[in-house]
Amino acid sequence: MKRETIAEALSSIADEYKAEALELELPDPSAASGKERNTVYRNRQKAGRISRRMLTFAIAACLLLALSITAYAVGSAVNSPKAAVRVAREELEKWKQMGLVSPEIRTDREPDRIVEIEGHTGSEYWYGRIFSHSYDVRWYMGEEEKYFLNLTVDTITGKLSSADIEARADETDVPVKDVEVDVPVDPDDPDGEWTTETLHLYENYDDIFPADMTVDRFCSLLAEYWGFTGYTLADTVDEAYYDAHWSAVDGNSLLKDMPADNYYLTIFFEGDQEGAPMYLQLSQFPGRVNLSLGTSHAIG
């Protein structure tokens, strides 16, 4: 809750209960005398203490109720696979409006798979990060689809905690020079012979995010979306997977120029209470490219 929202709620509650407290019908001590006057004073003091306690209790109860409703609303925002699909679509639209990803990415059709992921604690390779309960919503790349989407929706925050987005190259895209990959093709006939298809690598990252997107701009938008106050591009030390050490990239460089061969970027966000890194990775596959990011990114 915002500070001004709490202040507004407190002011209205306080005025109401103060008015009631002041309207208590007690005898006027000036009209009494002697022992009776002392009794009236004590009763008024007792009533005042009770009124203040009632006021304090009322404010605390209303705040607790308000906070509980807020927590319940957020926590129950994603309480089923159907809700996860709705939220995944809504949050992806936010990414589009922010300029993080291409507006051409579509989720109009029903997802191909929804996986519920229970909360768990990561291993040492995950820097001890705690993964909350989430739903993994997936749209596969069929013969007619250009995009593959794998969006992880956090059930507590209602935000996307990670995403894998792949885009198939178009006929107008130019393949990377002198790079060919021979891929075996399964025959339609079970008794038929396997054939080989020659595919190429592409750099059609502009199908996923704007071609002029810089690393700094992309990380700034992610920080804004996740509610962090800033970020730091860090060196990547990876002894568990790649046995390598990569220096942090220049934030002014274009995101699409970030090395895509077994490379990912390590980012620490300011305000992340866990102090765990987020990973950003570009990958090339025959005929398509991939962007992978998130606070629960699978290392490598």
Image (cartoon, grey):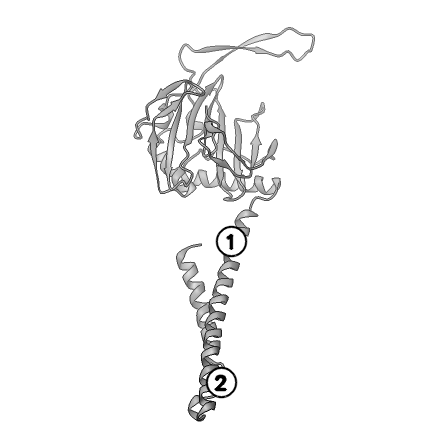
Q: Quadrant of residue 279?
A: top left
| Residue pointed to by mark 1 | 70
Point 49% across, 29% down: residue: 123
Sequence order check, earlier mark of 2 and 1: 2
Tell me: residue 179, above or below residue 282.
above
Mark 1 neighbour class, 10 Å CA radius: few under 14, some 14 to 19, many 20 or more: few
Work out whether residue 214 can be spotted: no
Front residue of 258/121: it is 121
Front residue of 198/234: it is 234
Point 49% across, 74% down: residue: 50
Q: Are marks 2 and 1 in contact (CB under 8 Å)?
A: no
| Residue pointed to by mark 2 | 26
| Left-right relation of 203 to 122 | left
Say what amino acid the circle numbered 1 marks.
Thr
Tell me: residue 136, above or below residue 174.
below
Q: Position of residue 216 (x, y in %)?
A: 33, 33
Front residue of 68/190: it is 68
